[in-house]
Amino acid sequence: LKKPTLETADLMQYIPAPDFAGGGQIITPADELRRIYETGKGSVRVRARYEIEKLARGQWRVIVTELPPNANSAKILAEIEEQTNPKPKAGKKQLNQDQLNTKKLMLDLIERVRDESDGEHPVRLVFEPKSSRIDTDTFINTLMAQTSLEGNVSMNLVMMGLDNRPAQKNLKTILQEWLDFRVVTVTRRLKFRLNQVEKRLHILEGRLKVFLHIDEVIKVIRESDDPKADLMAAFGLTEIQAEDILEIRLRQLARLEGFKLEKELNELREEQGRLNILLGDENEKRKLIIKEMQADMKQFGDARRTLVEEAGRAVLTQTTADEPITLILSEKGWIRSRAGHNLDLSQTAFKEGDCLKQTLEGRTVLPVVILDSLGRTYTLDAAEIPGGRGDGVPVSSLIELQNGAKPVAMLTGQPEQHYLLSGSGGYGFIAKLGDMVGRVKAGKVVMTVDSGETVLPPIAVYASSLINPDCKIVLASSDHRLLAFSIGELKVMPKGRGLQLMSLTD
């Protein structure tokens, strides 16, 4: 109202984001909030507000005190109960792997959760971790990602405009139309009051004339056959004024007090003057509207409840607890896992006619890549590989091996881990593990091999070796030839046939 030229970006200095009754924290970036206010549609990301309460002996717990608009304490507790004590999906007899992973994750994190909300604390949810050694950020991020402690709130700025039609509008248009409506409303109110004041003045002016000739008026009323017309003729009254005099009881008429009449007349004339100024001067009218708004703000306004502070969205990067495991692959392609590292596997049993092909130490949160004899790679979730002391399951039941290929090796580690891939045809290259990871059961082609060739077991290449000019790759062929060259001569490639490592005879 004071600065009509303000644009959306300027207005957001005063209205940075929605303000919810329950508080919470809006983590949506400012650019996205501005886009919502400019277009009138979008959604904001809101998360609960919490504090970490330190306890004795290094213990701690998380206290949630404010929730997003679409959440409540009962809903949060129900979501946690559903994840820690899941039921099989419709039509299934047992839990699927995702449910098992989520259950283990939540049970490994949360020891206890309770609702301590009361009259003094409208929201007070207490989360106690399984161990004080759990990272607080990991604990809170998991809760936010797995429950309604963080979620989206839709914004659809639809209003009934001055044309009496609902429409989606931006922030400036909404405010401007409301102000235009306010100006019209205040103008109508001022005109209505001015009309009342003028009517009252007219009545009081008639009474003042009567007061000056009270005895004569009473005589006319008593003796006249048409007192209304006679009053109008004798005292110069209008019809409205005469009606007012006739409606007053004689006792009241006799008691009219000139001082009170003069006082009220003067007050009304002053008000009439002010109203005429306000109706005739737009600047004065705008000042009045501002003054009324400020009075309303003082009476009804309160402090902002929802914090606006940009933060990253809570994303669950892993649904399983990070634990060490040892993977076991047999010659006939059976795979299983055992918990822990540095295990004594000398007594490991295999099916008749089968034997150990490879063991691999890894972690439950890292992908397991199977490299087959034709150069395809397949990705497994380590947590899905059966554990215990059984025989495991065929790799072919977890992936779709192509064209009769057989597993050559298992790989696991971080995406940046490098491996030397080579084939029996004498070609090879260095590849990152991240480039071998895929999403489909049918795998992805990483190595190209000619007909009759097969893939050899990969060799781990450490980062320090890649930059060491003295590091050599040494190859031996079946006809007793030996070749050594610097590792720097090889390319790092995501896929392909690679370079010729060694020239081989037929």
Image (cartoon, helix red, strand yellow):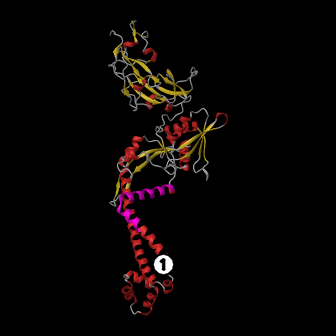
Q: How many marks?
A: 1
Q: Position of residue 170 (x, y in %)?
A: 36, 50
Helix, strand or loop: magenta stretch = helix
Q: Is residue 255 visible?
A: yes
Front residue of this view, candidates 461 and 388: 461
**Residue 384 within the segment the image draws in magenta:** no
Q: Position of residue 46 (x, y in %)?
A: 47, 44
Give left or right: position of 506 versus 262. left
- Residue under numbered circle 1: 258
Place residue 446 in its image quadrant: top left
Disc 1 secondary structure class: helix
| Amino acid under disc 1 | Gly
Residue at screen point 44% across, 79% down: 208
Q: Position of residue 449 (x, y in %)?
A: 34, 20
Front residue of this view, candidates 289 and 383: 289
Q: Position of residue 463 (x, y in %)?
A: 45, 18
Residue interval drawn in magenta:
272-298
